[in-house]
Amino acid sequence: MSLNMAGKVSVERPRTTAGQHLSLLVGVLLIVLGLAGFVVTGFDDFTGGTHEQQVIGFAVNPLANVLHLVLGALGLLARPGARRARWYGVLLVAAGAGLFAYSNNADVNVLNANWPTSALHLVLAFAGLVIAFVPVRAGKRPDTAELR
């Protein structure tokens, strides 16, 4: 709390950063994708599946759905704090890049990934970069009269 020039007490609220908004958006989208994936695949054949099991073009299986739900929940949990959102961005870069590299390996495709899913993982890695490194806009600097 601080006293402004008119003599009124003003409560300073921390600003919500763009990274926090993006972590919320990515989290919600991943949760929707995970839940829709379970509608398509059910819970059987956890690491199997065919490329016909798709949600808007993304091939899914129960393991992929769980990963989407976990990453989405972490995005929602990262929303309240700027530092948490930045760490979520770092995690998303690592997970997205790792899943992109992994999903391009046809020998061990336990995530049932197709090329749109691989592209989604690359987009998630890029979104993580944006969340982690988007500049945090500082609040208004106090005037010298306000410092007294």
Image (tube, rainbow, N blue to C red):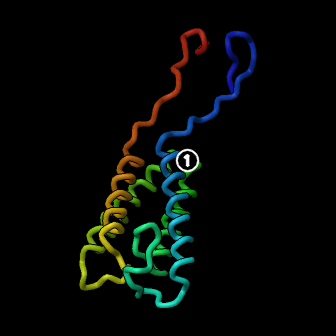
Residue drawn at x 40%, y 68% as measured from the top left: 57
Amino acid type at mark 1: Gly
Task: Examine the rendering and report whether any part of residue 113 can be seen.
Answer: yes
With 44 as the anchor, is 98 left or right in this view? left
Q: Is residue 143 above or below residue 73?
A: above
Q: Residue furthest right?
A: 8
Tell me residue 59's x, y (percent).
40, 75
Quadrant for residue 123, please give it: bottom left
With 42 as the anchor, is 125 left or right in this view? left
Q: Which residue is mark 1?
A: 81
Which quadrant is home to the C terminus?
top right
Tell me residue 116's x, y (percent).
34, 66
Q: Is residue 99 above or below residue 122?
A: below
| Disc 1 crowd, CA 10 A, few/some/many (<14, 14-19, 20+) | some
Tell me residue 146's x, y (percent).
60, 13
Residue toward you, 83 or 125: 125
Q: Is residue 24 above or below residue 70?
A: above
Residue drawn at x 30%, y 69% as measured from the top left: 115
Q: Secondary structure at mark 1?
A: loop
Residue toward you, 46 or 54: 54
Tell me residue 48's x, y (percent).
41, 88
- Tally of marks: 1
Residue drawn at x 47%, y 90% as measured from the top left: 45
Which quadrant is home to the N terminus?
top right
With 11 as the anchor, is 52 left or right in this view? left
Q: Is residue 78 above or below residue 110?
A: above
Quadrant for residue 92, please give it: bottom left
Residue drawn at x 48%, y 41% as measured from the top left: 18
Residue toward you, 132 or 64: 64
Task: Examine the rendering and report whether any part of residue 70 can be seen.
Answer: no
